[in-house]
Amino acid sequence: MSDEILQLKPGIYGVSLDLKALIKRLRSGGEAPDPVAALAERFLRVFLEHGVAVPQIPRLVADLPLSALRNVDTLIAALNPSVLETVAAMFGIRREWLDGVTETIYPDRFVYKDLPAFLELLPGEDLDPGVIEAMALASVELDYRKNQEQPVALVLRERVAVLGEQIVPRFIVLNDAWDWSYAPTRFQLKAMARICYERFGPIPIHRVPKSRLDAIRSGKAVPSELVSTKRITNPSMEDYVMTADESRVARETGEVADVLLYEVTILQDR
């Protein structure tokens, strides 16, 4: 079995790291994982889950030469605090997760009943198109007439770099347990979606298993299925927040007036 780490293979949610080359290093002669080797694995994993191939990493981290990525030992030697801080900031993740002291990748962000807090997460309106986008994840088709649980996650995708034609994203994951069947969360989600649509354009809805959605909105998984996603899907979240006059494919139009009133009332109280 090779110790080379420049091995990739397709994964369920995109390109993933072939961990065979790391497994025996993670087991330092026994059953206990080697925490230093685990740091190297997490470092590589975060790039791969954001669509960056191992040989491309030095293009984003200037202090890391390609030679450092030859095997686990050379990588570990190169992972100084400056490199780790650079990567944590680049992808908006916890440095503690890279260090292996927590399983939570992203910092907590809760905005339920706090629309102004959500607005503070959004950048200015003078950015170029596509620099930031809003995307949604759902485990079932959204329909406010149904009483069943309808979990939703809302994610902002920022463009932090471009490699050729490939966009390298950073994700801002909201941890709130949104449920489309519960009117208070649905109204706020719709208000947020309308704001995002007006600023950034279409908001694709991606269907994922509930277990995957829960892992993402708890901050314990990278939403890697959103790395290379096209902006327009059917349906999109904005379909649920527009009037029939605004869109021929508008859904749940009976709530639009209430959503607009909710948005205006909350923002006036800022």
Image (cartoon, rainbow, N blue to C red):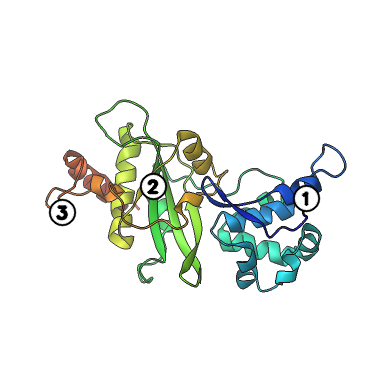
Say whether disc 1 or disc 2 marks the residue closer to the N-terminus: 1
Q: Which residue is mark 2?
A: 136
Q: Amino acid at mark 1?
A: Met
Badge number at residue 79? none
Residue beneath disc 1: 1
Labelled pair 1, 2 in contact (Cβ < 8 Å): no
What residue is drawn where x is 48% and y is 67%? 166
CA gap, disc 2 and disc 3 = 21 Å
Instruction: Check disc 2 and report its element: helix, strand or loop.
Output: strand
User: Where residue 246 is drawn, which disc sits there?
Assistant: 3
In the depicted structure, whether residue 66 falls above or below residue 263: below
Local SS, label 3 = loop
Amino acid type at circle 3 is Glu
Which comes sooner in the sequence, label 3 or label 1? 1
Q: Is residue 95 visible from the viewing direction of this image? A: no
The residue nearer to you, when weighing 106 against 207, is 207
SS type, badge 1: loop
User: Around disc 1, counting alpha carbons within 10 Å, would you say few (fewer than 14), some (14 to 19), or many (20 or more)?
Assistant: few
CA separation in Å, label 1 and label 2: 40 Å
Callout 3 crowding tier (Cα within 10 Å): few <14, some 14–19, many ≥20:
few
